[in-house]
Protein backbone atom coordinates (compact mmCIF):
# COMPACT_ATOMS: atom_id res chain seq x y z
CA UNK A 1 0.00 0.00 0.00
CA UNK A 2 2.84 2.39 0.85
CA UNK A 3 4.40 1.88 -2.59
CA UNK A 4 1.03 2.45 -4.30
CA UNK A 5 0.60 5.75 -2.43
CA UNK A 6 4.13 6.83 -3.38
CA UNK A 7 3.55 5.86 -7.01
CA UNK A 8 0.25 7.78 -7.12
CA UNK A 9 2.04 10.77 -5.65
CA UNK A 10 4.79 10.46 -8.24
CA UNK A 11 2.22 10.26 -11.04
CA UNK A 12 0.61 13.44 -9.74
CA UNK A 13 4.03 15.12 -9.68
CA UNK A 14 4.70 13.98 -13.25
CA UNK A 15 1.35 15.40 -14.36
CA UNK A 16 1.91 18.75 -12.66
CA UNK A 17 5.41 18.98 -14.09
CA UNK A 18 4.31 18.05 -17.61
CA UNK A 19 4.58 21.64 -18.77
CA UNK A 20 8.37 21.36 -18.55
CA UNK A 21 8.90 17.84 -19.92
CA UNK A 22 7.21 15.18 -21.97
CA UNK A 23 6.70 11.67 -20.64
CA UNK A 24 7.05 8.58 -22.80
CA UNK A 25 4.79 5.68 -21.88
CA UNK A 26 1.91 5.03 -19.55
CA UNK A 27 3.32 6.65 -16.45
CA UNK A 28 0.44 5.64 -14.14
CA UNK A 29 -0.07 2.05 -15.20
CA UNK A 30 -1.90 -0.18 -12.76
CA UNK A 31 0.01 -1.73 -9.86
CA UNK A 32 -0.11 -5.51 -9.95
CA UNK A 33 2.18 -8.50 -9.58
CA UNK A 34 4.73 -6.82 -11.81
CA UNK A 35 6.72 -3.99 -10.24
CA UNK A 36 6.58 -0.60 -11.87
CA UNK A 37 8.91 2.36 -11.83
CA UNK A 38 9.84 5.54 -13.63
CA UNK A 39 13.21 6.60 -14.96
CA UNK A 40 13.52 10.36 -15.27
CA UNK A 41 16.20 11.46 -17.73
CA UNK A 42 17.41 15.00 -17.08
CA UNK A 43 18.16 16.32 -20.54
CA UNK A 44 19.08 19.98 -20.05
CA UNK A 45 22.84 19.55 -19.97
CA UNK A 46 25.30 16.68 -20.12
CA UNK A 47 26.83 15.78 -16.75
CA UNK A 48 29.85 14.04 -18.26
CA UNK A 49 31.64 13.16 -21.48
CA UNK A 50 33.22 9.96 -22.71
CA UNK A 51 35.48 9.25 -25.66
CA UNK A 52 33.89 7.78 -28.79
CA UNK A 53 36.14 4.81 -28.15
CA UNK A 54 35.32 4.70 -24.43
CA UNK A 55 35.39 0.90 -24.33
CA UNK A 56 38.94 -0.40 -23.99
CA UNK A 57 40.40 -3.84 -23.29
CA UNK A 58 43.79 -5.02 -22.12
CA UNK A 59 46.39 -7.49 -23.32
CA UNK A 60 48.76 -8.74 -20.64
CA UNK A 61 52.20 -10.27 -20.30
CA UNK A 62 51.33 -13.22 -18.02
CA UNK A 63 52.93 -16.52 -19.15
CA UNK A 64 51.07 -19.88 -18.90
CA UNK A 65 52.76 -20.44 -15.53
CA UNK A 66 50.73 -17.59 -13.96
CA UNK A 67 48.50 -19.38 -11.45
CA UNK A 68 46.10 -18.21 -8.75
CA UNK A 69 44.67 -20.36 -5.97
CA UNK A 70 46.17 -23.43 -7.65
CA UNK A 71 44.51 -22.75 -11.02
CA UNK A 72 46.35 -21.58 -14.12
CA UNK A 73 43.95 -19.66 -16.34
CA UNK A 74 46.13 -17.67 -18.74
CA UNK A 75 47.14 -20.30 -21.27
CA UNK A 76 48.62 -18.77 -24.41
CA UNK A 77 47.09 -15.33 -23.98
CA UNK A 78 50.33 -13.48 -23.33
CA UNK A 79 51.52 -10.71 -25.60
CA UNK A 80 54.47 -12.98 -26.33
CA UNK A 81 52.53 -16.11 -27.37
CA UNK A 82 48.96 -15.09 -28.34
CA UNK A 83 47.83 -16.50 -31.71
CA UNK A 84 47.52 -13.29 -33.71
CA UNK A 85 46.27 -15.21 -36.76
CA UNK A 86 43.06 -16.33 -35.07
CA UNK A 87 40.10 -15.08 -37.14
CA UNK A 88 37.77 -14.68 -34.18
CA UNK A 89 40.33 -12.53 -32.36
CA UNK A 90 40.75 -10.28 -35.40
CA UNK A 91 37.01 -9.98 -36.04
CA UNK A 92 36.25 -9.37 -32.38
CA UNK A 93 38.51 -6.32 -32.34
CA UNK A 94 37.47 -5.09 -35.79
CA UNK A 95 33.79 -5.11 -34.75
CA UNK A 96 34.42 -2.05 -32.56
CA UNK A 97 35.89 0.22 -35.22
CA UNK A 98 37.87 1.08 -33.18
CA UNK A 99 38.82 -0.56 -29.90
CA UNK A 100 41.42 0.89 -27.56
CA UNK A 101 43.82 -1.85 -26.45
CA UNK A 102 45.98 -1.23 -23.43
CA UNK A 103 49.16 -3.31 -23.58
CA UNK A 104 50.48 -3.83 -20.09
CA UNK A 105 50.02 -5.32 -16.64
CA UNK A 106 52.04 -6.34 -13.62
CA UNK A 107 55.04 -7.69 -15.53
CA UNK A 108 55.42 -4.60 -17.76
CA UNK A 109 57.80 -3.14 -15.17
CA UNK A 110 60.10 -6.11 -15.71
CA UNK A 111 60.06 -6.03 -19.52
CA UNK A 112 63.22 -5.41 -21.52
CA UNK A 113 62.84 -4.30 -25.15
CA UNK A 114 65.02 -6.18 -27.62
CA UNK A 115 66.13 -3.14 -29.59
CA UNK A 116 69.48 -2.72 -31.30
CA UNK A 117 71.10 -1.04 -28.31
CA UNK A 118 69.93 -3.67 -25.81
CA UNK A 119 72.97 -5.67 -24.72
CA UNK A 120 71.08 -8.13 -22.53
CA UNK A 121 69.82 -11.53 -23.76
CA UNK A 122 66.26 -11.30 -25.11
CA UNK A 123 64.76 -14.19 -23.15
CA UNK A 124 61.16 -14.83 -22.01
CA UNK A 125 59.80 -14.60 -18.48
CA UNK A 126 60.69 -17.54 -16.25
CA UNK A 127 58.71 -18.52 -13.16
CA UNK A 128 60.65 -17.93 -9.94
CA UNK A 129 58.75 -17.66 -6.68
CA UNK A 130 61.63 -15.71 -5.11
CA UNK A 131 61.40 -12.91 -7.67
CA UNK A 132 59.13 -9.88 -7.33
CA UNK A 133 55.77 -10.72 -8.99
CA UNK A 134 56.89 -14.36 -9.22
CA UNK A 135 58.81 -14.09 -12.49
CA UNK A 136 62.23 -13.08 -13.78
CA UNK A 137 62.65 -10.28 -16.26
CA UNK A 138 61.34 -10.96 -19.74
CA UNK A 139 62.08 -9.49 -23.13
CA UNK A 140 59.95 -8.23 -26.03
CA UNK A 141 61.75 -9.17 -29.28
CA UNK A 142 61.33 -6.64 -32.04
CA UNK A 143 60.01 -9.26 -34.47
CA UNK A 144 57.16 -9.90 -32.00
CA UNK A 145 56.58 -6.15 -31.70
CA UNK A 146 56.33 -6.09 -35.50
CA UNK A 147 53.77 -8.92 -35.42
CA UNK A 148 51.71 -7.20 -32.75
CA UNK A 149 51.63 -3.93 -34.67
CA UNK A 150 50.64 -5.72 -37.85
CA UNK A 151 47.70 -7.22 -35.98
CA UNK A 152 46.74 -3.90 -34.40
CA UNK A 153 46.77 -2.24 -37.81
CA UNK A 154 44.60 -4.95 -39.41
CA UNK A 155 42.16 -4.82 -36.51
CA UNK A 156 41.97 -1.02 -36.42
CA UNK A 157 42.96 -0.92 -32.75
CA UNK A 158 44.23 2.13 -30.88
CA UNK A 159 47.22 1.00 -28.84
CA UNK A 160 48.26 2.22 -25.39
CA UNK A 161 51.63 0.71 -24.47
CA UNK A 162 52.78 0.45 -20.86
CA UNK A 163 56.48 1.17 -20.36
CA UNK A 164 58.86 -0.14 -17.69
CA UNK A 165 58.93 2.51 -14.93
CA UNK A 166 61.21 0.44 -12.66
CA UNK A 167 64.12 0.48 -15.10
CA UNK A 168 67.19 1.93 -13.37
CA UNK A 169 65.60 2.11 -9.93
CA UNK A 170 66.83 0.38 -6.79
CA UNK A 171 64.39 -1.28 -4.39
CA UNK A 172 64.71 -0.21 -0.76
CA UNK A 173 62.19 -1.27 1.91
CA UNK A 174 59.33 -1.53 -0.58
CA UNK A 175 60.16 1.72 -2.39
CA UNK A 176 61.67 2.05 -5.86
CA UNK A 177 64.06 4.99 -5.66
CA UNK A 178 66.08 6.94 -8.17
CA UNK A 179 65.26 8.36 -11.60
CA UNK A 180 63.81 6.28 -14.41
CA UNK A 181 66.45 4.95 -16.79
CA UNK A 182 64.61 5.60 -20.03
CA UNK A 183 67.37 4.51 -22.42
CA UNK A 184 65.74 1.20 -23.40
CA UNK A 185 62.23 2.71 -23.56
CA UNK A 186 63.50 5.57 -25.71
CA UNK A 187 65.02 3.10 -28.16
CA UNK A 188 61.66 1.26 -28.37
CA UNK A 189 59.84 4.50 -29.08
CA UNK A 190 62.43 5.47 -31.68
CA UNK A 191 62.07 2.06 -33.36
CA UNK A 192 58.28 2.40 -33.30
CA UNK A 193 58.40 5.83 -34.93
CA UNK A 194 60.87 4.63 -37.56
CA UNK A 195 58.54 1.75 -38.43
CA UNK A 196 55.60 4.20 -38.60
CA UNK A 197 53.59 2.18 -36.07
CA UNK A 198 50.75 4.27 -34.68
CA UNK A 199 50.63 4.36 -30.88
CA UNK A 200 47.69 6.17 -29.31
CA UNK A 201 49.42 6.59 -25.97
CA UNK A 202 52.53 5.70 -23.97
CA UNK A 203 51.78 4.83 -20.34
CA UNK A 204 54.47 4.74 -17.67
CA UNK A 205 54.37 2.11 -14.94
CA UNK A 206 51.80 -0.30 -13.51
CA UNK A 207 50.38 -0.18 -9.95
CA UNK A 208 53.35 1.64 -8.43
CA UNK A 209 51.45 4.63 -6.99
CA UNK A 210 50.27 5.04 -3.41
CA UNK A 211 51.22 1.94 -1.46
CA UNK A 212 51.96 0.13 -4.70
CA UNK A 213 51.63 -3.56 -5.46
CA UNK A 214 54.93 -5.11 -4.45
CA UNK A 215 56.78 -1.81 -4.63
CA UNK A 216 55.89 1.88 -4.85
CA UNK A 217 57.32 5.08 -6.33
CA UNK A 218 57.00 8.45 -4.59
CA UNK A 219 54.68 10.95 -6.30
CA UNK A 220 57.37 13.59 -6.89
CA UNK A 221 59.74 11.05 -8.47
CA UNK A 222 56.92 9.69 -10.62
CA UNK A 223 56.12 13.22 -11.80
CA UNK A 224 59.77 13.71 -12.74
CA UNK A 225 59.81 10.41 -14.66
CA UNK A 226 56.64 11.32 -16.57
CA UNK A 227 58.24 14.65 -17.50
CA UNK A 228 61.13 12.65 -18.98
CA UNK A 229 58.66 10.57 -21.00
CA UNK A 230 56.97 13.75 -22.25
CA UNK A 231 60.33 15.05 -23.42
CA UNK A 232 61.05 11.81 -25.30
CA UNK A 233 57.64 11.86 -27.00
CA UNK A 234 58.04 15.50 -28.02
CA UNK A 235 61.49 14.82 -29.42
CA UNK A 236 60.88 11.49 -31.21
CA UNK A 237 57.56 12.62 -32.68
CA UNK A 238 58.83 16.02 -33.79
CA UNK A 239 56.87 17.04 -36.88
CA UNK A 240 54.33 14.24 -36.39
CA UNK A 241 50.74 15.03 -35.44
CA UNK A 242 48.83 14.02 -33.51
CA UNK A 243 51.42 12.95 -30.99
CA UNK A 244 50.70 10.01 -28.67
CA UNK A 245 49.16 10.73 -25.30
CA UNK A 246 51.40 10.60 -22.22
CA UNK A 247 49.60 8.51 -19.60
CA UNK A 248 50.26 7.65 -15.93
CA UNK A 249 50.31 6.28 -13.24
CA UNK A 250 48.20 3.17 -13.94
CA UNK A 251 47.60 2.20 -10.33
CA UNK A 252 45.10 2.20 -7.49
CA UNK A 253 43.63 5.50 -6.40
CA UNK A 254 45.23 7.15 -3.38
CA UNK A 255 43.88 10.69 -2.96
CA UNK A 256 46.98 12.28 -1.42
CA UNK A 257 49.36 10.58 -3.85
CA UNK A 258 47.24 11.53 -6.88
CA UNK A 259 46.92 15.16 -5.68
CA UNK A 260 50.69 15.49 -5.36
CA UNK A 261 51.40 13.71 -8.64
CA UNK A 262 48.91 15.80 -10.63
CA UNK A 263 50.20 18.99 -9.05
CA UNK A 264 53.87 18.24 -9.69
CA UNK A 265 53.54 16.69 -13.13
CA UNK A 266 52.42 19.99 -14.63
CA UNK A 267 51.60 19.62 -18.30
CA UNK A 268 53.58 16.38 -18.69
CA UNK A 269 50.62 13.98 -18.47
CA UNK A 270 47.56 14.06 -20.71
CA UNK A 271 45.70 11.31 -18.88
CA UNK A 272 45.69 9.94 -15.33
CA UNK A 273 44.76 6.28 -15.10
CA UNK A 274 43.60 4.26 -12.13
CA UNK A 275 42.72 0.60 -11.61
CA UNK A 276 39.62 -0.95 -10.04
CA UNK A 277 39.16 -4.43 -8.57
CA UNK A 278 36.26 -3.70 -6.24
CA UNK A 279 34.75 -7.20 -5.99
CA UNK A 280 37.59 -8.74 -3.96
CA UNK A 281 39.63 -11.88 -4.66
CA UNK A 282 38.69 -14.23 -7.46
CA UNK A 283 38.61 -17.14 -5.02
CA UNK A 284 35.59 -15.63 -3.19
CA UNK A 285 32.56 -17.94 -3.45
CA UNK A 286 30.15 -15.06 -2.84
CA UNK A 287 30.99 -12.99 -5.91
CA UNK A 288 27.55 -13.48 -7.48
CA UNK A 289 25.78 -12.16 -4.40
CA UNK A 290 28.16 -9.20 -4.31
CA UNK A 291 27.51 -8.36 -7.96
CA UNK A 292 23.72 -8.37 -7.44
CA UNK A 293 23.89 -6.20 -4.30
CA UNK A 294 23.19 -2.54 -5.18
CA UNK A 295 25.08 -1.27 -2.13
CA UNK A 296 28.20 -3.17 -3.19
CA UNK A 297 27.95 -1.86 -6.74
CA UNK A 298 27.79 1.68 -5.34
CA UNK A 299 31.20 1.29 -3.65
CA UNK A 300 33.50 2.65 -6.40
CA UNK A 301 31.41 5.81 -6.83
CA UNK A 302 33.43 7.50 -4.09
CA UNK A 303 36.69 6.89 -5.99
CA UNK A 304 35.25 8.31 -9.20
CA UNK A 305 33.83 11.30 -7.33
CA UNK A 306 37.05 12.13 -5.49
CA UNK A 307 39.25 11.83 -8.58
CA UNK A 308 36.86 14.04 -10.54
CA UNK A 309 37.12 16.61 -7.73
CA UNK A 310 40.93 16.56 -7.79
CA UNK A 311 41.00 17.08 -11.55
CA UNK A 312 38.38 19.84 -11.39
CA UNK A 313 40.47 21.75 -8.85
CA UNK A 314 43.70 21.26 -10.79
CA UNK A 315 45.09 23.84 -13.18
CA UNK A 316 46.43 21.00 -15.35
CA UNK A 317 44.21 19.88 -18.20
CA UNK A 318 44.23 16.13 -17.71
CA UNK A 319 41.45 13.60 -18.10
CA UNK A 320 40.69 10.44 -16.13
CA UNK A 321 40.66 6.88 -17.46
CA UNK A 322 40.15 3.53 -15.81
CA UNK A 323 43.30 1.91 -17.12
CA UNK A 324 42.53 -1.60 -15.87
CA UNK A 325 39.46 -3.15 -14.24
CA UNK A 326 38.76 -6.83 -13.81
CA UNK A 327 36.30 -6.73 -10.94
CA UNK A 328 37.72 -9.71 -9.02
CA UNK A 329 41.51 -9.68 -8.74
CA UNK A 330 43.91 -12.58 -9.25
CA UNK A 331 42.48 -13.57 -12.63
CA UNK A 332 38.79 -13.56 -11.71
CA UNK A 333 36.57 -16.60 -11.10
CA UNK A 334 35.53 -19.16 -13.70
CA UNK A 335 31.77 -19.21 -14.42
CA UNK A 336 31.38 -15.84 -12.74
CA UNK A 337 33.75 -13.33 -14.37
CA UNK A 338 33.45 -15.13 -17.73
CA UNK A 339 29.69 -15.69 -17.41
CA UNK A 340 26.46 -13.75 -17.88
CA UNK A 341 26.26 -12.44 -14.30
CA UNK A 342 29.42 -10.35 -14.77
CA UNK A 343 27.67 -8.04 -17.21
CA UNK A 344 25.73 -6.54 -14.29
CA UNK A 345 29.00 -5.47 -12.66
CA UNK A 346 30.66 -4.52 -15.95
CA UNK A 347 27.89 -2.41 -17.47
CA UNK A 348 27.20 -0.77 -14.13
CA UNK A 349 30.88 0.19 -13.96
CA UNK A 350 30.78 1.63 -17.47
CA UNK A 351 27.68 3.65 -16.61
CA UNK A 352 28.91 4.83 -13.23
CA UNK A 353 32.39 5.80 -14.39
CA UNK A 354 30.93 7.78 -17.30
CA UNK A 355 28.73 9.78 -14.91
CA UNK A 356 31.92 11.01 -13.22
CA UNK A 357 33.59 12.10 -16.47
CA UNK A 358 35.80 9.05 -16.97
CA UNK A 359 36.74 9.22 -20.65
CA UNK A 360 37.93 5.63 -21.24
CA UNK A 361 37.41 2.33 -19.39
CA UNK A 362 39.85 -0.56 -20.00
CA UNK A 363 38.58 -4.04 -19.18
CA UNK A 364 41.00 -6.64 -17.92
CA UNK A 365 41.18 -8.44 -20.23
CA UNK A 366 40.50 -8.82 -23.93
CA UNK A 367 41.68 -12.40 -23.57
CA UNK A 368 43.39 -14.18 -20.68
CA UNK A 369 42.54 -15.21 -17.13
CA UNK A 370 38.96 -15.91 -16.14
CA UNK A 371 37.81 -12.37 -16.90
CA UNK A 372 38.58 -12.15 -20.62
CA UNK A 373 36.02 -10.79 -23.03
CA UNK A 374 37.08 -13.75 -25.19
CA UNK A 375 37.53 -17.35 -24.07
CA UNK A 376 41.23 -17.99 -23.51
CA UNK A 377 41.21 -21.36 -25.30
CA UNK A 378 38.55 -21.09 -28.03
CA UNK A 379 38.60 -17.30 -28.54
CA UNK A 380 34.78 -17.39 -28.52
CA UNK A 381 33.18 -14.24 -27.06
CA UNK A 382 32.07 -14.44 -23.46
CA UNK A 383 28.83 -12.60 -22.51
CA UNK A 384 30.64 -9.41 -21.51
CA UNK A 385 32.02 -9.07 -25.03
CA UNK A 386 28.52 -8.53 -26.38
CA UNK A 387 27.67 -6.16 -23.52
CA UNK A 388 30.76 -4.12 -24.37
CA UNK A 389 29.95 -4.08 -28.10
CA UNK A 390 26.37 -2.94 -27.53
CA UNK A 391 27.56 -0.17 -25.21
CA UNK A 392 30.12 0.94 -27.80
CA UNK A 393 27.53 1.12 -30.56
CA UNK A 394 24.63 2.67 -28.64
CA UNK A 395 25.93 4.94 -25.86
CA UNK A 396 27.09 8.30 -27.17
CA UNK A 397 29.65 10.72 -25.81
CA UNK A 398 27.29 12.91 -23.76
CA UNK A 399 26.24 11.48 -20.39
CA UNK A 400 22.81 12.34 -18.98
CA UNK A 401 21.68 12.39 -15.38
CA UNK A 402 19.00 9.83 -14.51
CA UNK A 403 16.81 9.24 -11.48
CA UNK A 404 14.88 6.00 -10.99
CA UNK A 405 11.75 5.91 -8.87
CA UNK A 406 10.94 2.39 -7.71
CA UNK A 407 12.78 -0.73 -6.56
CA UNK A 408 16.44 -0.44 -5.59
CA UNK A 409 17.13 -3.50 -7.71
CA UNK A 410 16.95 -1.41 -10.89
CA UNK A 411 20.04 0.50 -12.08
CA UNK A 412 19.68 3.02 -14.90
CA UNK A 413 22.05 5.09 -17.03
CA UNK A 414 21.39 7.27 -20.07
CA UNK A 415 23.46 8.87 -22.84
CA UNK A 416 22.67 10.80 -25.96
CA UNK A 417 22.43 8.14 -28.65
CA UNK A 418 25.59 7.39 -30.59
CA UNK A 419 25.71 8.49 -34.24
CA UNK A 420 21.92 8.82 -34.33
CA UNK A 421 19.12 10.92 -32.94
CA UNK A 422 17.57 10.48 -29.55
CA UNK A 423 18.69 8.93 -26.31
CA UNK A 424 19.82 5.47 -25.22
CA UNK A 425 18.85 4.20 -21.77
CA UNK A 426 20.54 1.26 -20.07
CA UNK A 427 18.45 -0.63 -17.50
CA UNK A 428 19.84 -3.39 -15.25
CA UNK A 429 17.41 -5.54 -13.24
CA UNK A 430 19.27 -7.22 -10.38
CA UNK A 431 16.14 -8.98 -9.06
CA UNK A 432 15.99 -12.71 -9.79
CA UNK A 433 12.20 -13.06 -9.68
CA UNK A 434 10.54 -9.75 -10.51
CA UNK A 435 9.78 -8.15 -13.86
CA UNK A 436 9.80 -4.36 -13.79
CA UNK A 437 7.87 -2.14 -16.18
CA UNK A 438 9.94 1.01 -16.55
CA UNK A 439 8.22 4.14 -17.81
CA UNK A 440 10.45 6.85 -19.23
CA UNK A 441 10.12 10.57 -18.50
CA UNK A 442 12.28 12.96 -20.47
CA UNK A 443 12.93 16.38 -19.00
CA UNK A 444 13.78 19.16 -21.48
CA UNK A 445 12.62 17.26 -24.56
CA UNK A 446 12.48 19.79 -27.40
CA UNK A 447 10.37 17.71 -29.79
CA UNK A 448 6.57 17.73 -29.53
CA UNK A 449 4.88 14.53 -28.43
CA UNK A 450 3.40 12.92 -31.54
CA UNK A 451 1.44 10.05 -30.00
CA UNK A 452 1.18 6.49 -31.28
CA UNK A 453 2.50 7.30 -34.76
CA UNK A 454 5.98 8.20 -33.51
CA UNK A 455 8.93 5.97 -34.51
CA UNK A 456 9.28 2.77 -32.55
CA UNK A 457 11.72 2.35 -29.69
CA UNK A 458 14.60 -0.03 -30.40
CA UNK A 459 15.27 -2.48 -27.57
CA UNK A 460 18.09 -4.94 -26.93
CA UNK A 461 17.25 -7.44 -24.17
CA UNK A 462 20.20 -9.42 -22.79
CA UNK A 463 19.42 -12.58 -20.85
CA UNK A 464 20.93 -15.94 -19.95
CA UNK A 465 19.36 -19.27 -20.95
CA UNK A 466 16.83 -20.29 -18.26
CA UNK A 467 18.09 -17.37 -16.14
CA UNK A 468 21.30 -19.29 -15.45
CA UNK A 469 23.56 -16.49 -14.23
CA UNK A 470 26.63 -18.69 -14.63
CA UNK A 471 25.96 -19.47 -18.28
CA UNK A 472 28.62 -18.47 -20.79
CA UNK A 473 25.92 -18.03 -23.43
CA UNK A 474 24.30 -14.65 -24.02
CA UNK A 475 20.84 -14.27 -25.52
CA UNK A 476 19.86 -11.11 -27.39
CA UNK A 477 16.10 -10.75 -27.60
CA UNK A 478 15.84 -14.47 -26.94
CA UNK A 479 18.33 -15.58 -29.61
CA UNK A 480 21.73 -17.11 -28.89
CA UNK A 481 24.67 -14.91 -29.85
CA UNK A 482 27.52 -16.89 -31.43
CA UNK A 483 30.14 -16.52 -34.12
CA UNK A 484 29.68 -18.45 -37.35
CA UNK A 485 31.98 -21.00 -38.95
CA UNK A 486 33.97 -18.17 -40.56
CA UNK A 487 34.64 -16.62 -37.15
CA UNK A 488 32.40 -13.63 -37.83
CA UNK A 489 30.78 -11.70 -34.98
CA UNK A 490 26.96 -11.91 -35.14
CA UNK A 491 24.77 -8.93 -35.95
CA UNK A 492 23.20 -7.29 -32.91
CA UNK A 493 19.64 -6.61 -34.04
CA UNK A 494 16.99 -4.84 -31.93
CA UNK A 495 13.30 -5.48 -31.53
CA UNK A 496 10.92 -2.59 -32.22
CA UNK A 497 8.49 -1.56 -29.49
CA UNK A 498 5.70 1.01 -29.36
CA UNK A 499 7.29 4.07 -27.76
CA UNK A 500 4.18 4.71 -25.67
CA UNK A 501 4.66 1.42 -23.82
CA UNK A 502 6.92 0.97 -20.78
CA UNK A 503 10.24 -0.84 -21.08
CA UNK A 504 9.63 -4.34 -19.76
CA UNK A 505 12.74 -5.59 -17.97
CA UNK A 506 12.64 -9.25 -17.00
CA UNK A 507 14.26 -10.76 -13.89
CA UNK A 508 18.08 -10.69 -13.95
CA UNK A 509 18.13 -9.13 -17.38
CA UNK A 510 19.65 -6.11 -19.07
CA UNK A 511 18.02 -3.78 -21.59
CA UNK A 512 19.44 -1.11 -23.87
CA UNK A 513 16.57 1.05 -25.15
CA UNK A 514 17.22 3.51 -27.97
CA UNK A 515 14.49 6.16 -28.22
CA UNK A 516 15.11 7.93 -31.55
CA UNK A 517 12.25 10.42 -31.68
CA UNK A 518 13.35 12.80 -28.94
CA UNK A 519 15.63 15.81 -28.95
CA UNK A 520 16.98 16.64 -25.52
CA UNK A 521 18.63 20.00 -25.01
CA UNK A 522 21.83 18.25 -23.92
CA UNK A 523 21.95 16.27 -27.17
CA UNK A 524 21.19 19.06 -29.61
Image: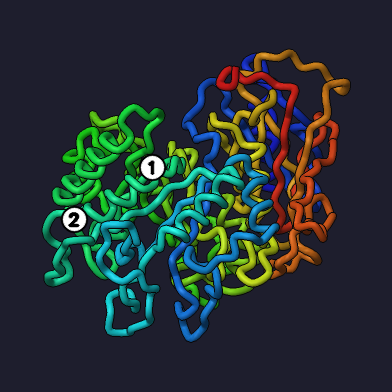
Residue 306 screen position, x and y as percent:
32, 44
Q: Distance between the residues labelled 2 and 1?
A: 22 Å
Residue toward you, 338 or 88: 88
Return the disc, 2 or 1, that comes first in the chain's sequence. 2
The residue beneath circle 2 is: 181
Q: Residue furthest front?
A: 116
Residue at image point 58% right, 43% down: 156
Residue 59 percent across, percent down from the top left: 49, 59
Q: Residue 194 carries which label?
A: 1
Front residue of 137 and 23:
137
Left or right of residue 507: residue 272: left
Q: Position of residue 395 (x, y in %)?
A: 62, 36
Q: Position of residue 476 (x, y in %)?
A: 78, 52
Asked if one can make out residue 346 in the rendered structure from this viewpoint, the answer is yes
Q: How crowded is mark 1: few (under 14 residues within 10 Å), some or many (20 or more)?
A: few
Mark number, residue 172: none
Q: Which residue is at the front of the view, 363 or 461?
A: 363
Image quarter where the C terminus lies is top right
Q: Label 2 neighbourhood size at 10 Å, few (<14), some (14-19), many (20+)?
A: some
Amino acid sequence: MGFQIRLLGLCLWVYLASLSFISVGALCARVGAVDKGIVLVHGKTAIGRIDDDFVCATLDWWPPQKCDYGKCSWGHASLLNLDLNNKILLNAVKAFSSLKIRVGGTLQDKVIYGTEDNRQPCTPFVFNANEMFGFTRGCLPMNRWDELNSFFQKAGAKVIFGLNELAGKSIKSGFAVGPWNYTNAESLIRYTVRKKYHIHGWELGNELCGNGIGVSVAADQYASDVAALRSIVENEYRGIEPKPLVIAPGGFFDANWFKEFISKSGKSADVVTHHIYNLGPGVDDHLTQTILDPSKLDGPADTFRRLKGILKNSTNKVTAWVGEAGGAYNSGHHLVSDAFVYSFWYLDQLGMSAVYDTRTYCRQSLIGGNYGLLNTTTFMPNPDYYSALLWHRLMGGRVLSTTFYGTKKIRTYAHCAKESKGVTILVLNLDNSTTVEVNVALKFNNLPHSGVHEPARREYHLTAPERNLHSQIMLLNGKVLSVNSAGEIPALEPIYVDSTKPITVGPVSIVFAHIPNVLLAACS
